[in-house]
Image (cartoon, rainbow, N blue to C red):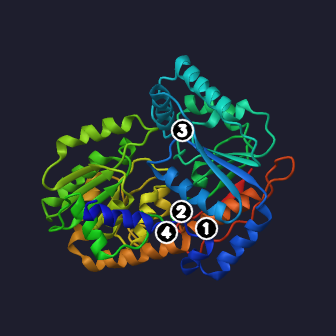
Amino acid sequence: MHKSDREHAGLIRMSATHGIRAYERYAGKETIRRIEAKARPLRDMHILHMNSTYYGGGVSQLLSSLTLLLNSLGIQTGWRVVHGPPDFFSVTKKFHNALQGAEINLTGRKQELYEEVIRENAMRNHLNHDMVFIHDPQPLPMIAHYRKKSPWIWRCHIDLTAPNPKVWNYLVPFIEKYDAVVLSSREYRQNIRTPQVFSMPAIDPFSIVNRELSESAIDERLAHYGIPTDLPLVVQVSRFDRWKDPLGVIRAFEKARREEECTLVLVGNVATDDPEGAEVYRSLLAHRGERVIIQSVQDGALVNALQRRAAVVLQKSIREGFGLTVSEAMWKGAAVIGGNVGGIRYQIRDGENGFLVSSVDEAAARIVQLLRDPDLRARLGHAAHETVRECFLFTRSVEQYLDLIGSFEPDFRLREMKEPSCGGSANPGGPGREP
């Protein structure tokens, strides 16, 4: 085995599962004791999460950490994914885009394919759990194929600011079969009968993407991929998705480099449930150059290294349910420029812990400003780290899941929930529930 491969393997081994008490160093004893107390009466439960992929994007990262920690708390928690042919995921990607406001030709054939593949998945999956969480639109109709014996919750991670009415109206009958809907922000609230709960995602400080790295480990990862460090790094990490505006990032970089020398690194992956990802990635390759590095890899340690070494981190999304990579970079003390949309606005307070932008020109100007002012980068980075520590750490998200799990009546009605507070939250609404 090559030396760099041995070191990388070491990074993976060091990311072994952590119990809840390991988080005490970040969340404090009181929070950990409260989580343990809330988990204790739920230990006889068997819970299932289902989404559309085991890797690629924020949902799989969230579920990877969440399912392991709930099991370590004594709550038997499983994770399954929906299976289907490429045509199925092509349709669900169009649904995803339409829920974020894109146009769609909603044909009967698309609906038939969607429902037939889900029917097949329901035949393969015997869901007799004490609680079922279904994530995003891909497996949404699963609920229609079961005699429901426990609460079912739909967790939607998408920016629902202005969903396409054709797709939304088609999906509402499935959504209203659920006992609760969890959205990332009150801004995404919809006019449905199902109770809606609002809870932001959060990052796991012990995941490979977020755990502490030495300078030598950072150097090794960057060298392994041939990423030069002679000039300041401008970095965006995200799936190759047009909603992340990678072309806009390249254009902003090209404008900025006319005034300040720097290197752009775009790192992403092509998830199994996103057939458009490969197309978007290929469309960017013509822009590759000595100072424009575009990598499609699934390497959490590389993401970690880039976010720690970057002079500037961007997440220039034009729609964003939350944007987990924003909190990831903020946790590492990076100076972050985010699109002024969706969940990014709940993480970044413009000018206080990062910058919000609405155009290529604004992004370019902020890149130049940050490259020229290391003191500003340090001040924003420190405030960003504190924002994540107070509001967007994994323990807060785990506690909210425990509150939700424990808040159903025997007839599956959702009781009022008292949510944990988030001191100094960037989220003006905070978590909560509305009927």
Tag 1 or tag 4, which sits nearer the N-term?
4
Residue 376: where, in percent of width, then height? 30, 77
Residue wearing tag 2: 202
Residue wearing tag 3: 163
**Label 4 secondary element:** loop
**Label 1 secondary element:** helix
Tag 3 or tag 1, which sits nearer the N-term?
3
Tell me: 129 left or right of 186: right
Q: Quadrant of residue 140?
A: top right
How far is the residue under mark 4 from the one under mark 2? 12 Å
Q: Nearer the viewer, residue 119 or 325?
A: 119
Q: Residue at x 58, y 55 (%)?
A: 185
How far is the residue under mark 4 from the one under mark 1? 15 Å
Residue wearing tag 1: 396
Residue wearing tag 4: 206
Q: Quadrant of residue 382?
A: bottom left
How far is the residue under mark 1 from the one under mark 3? 28 Å
Residue 251: where, in percent of width, then height? 22, 50
**Amino acid at the residue labelled 2:** Ala
**Amino acid at the residue labelled 3:** Pro
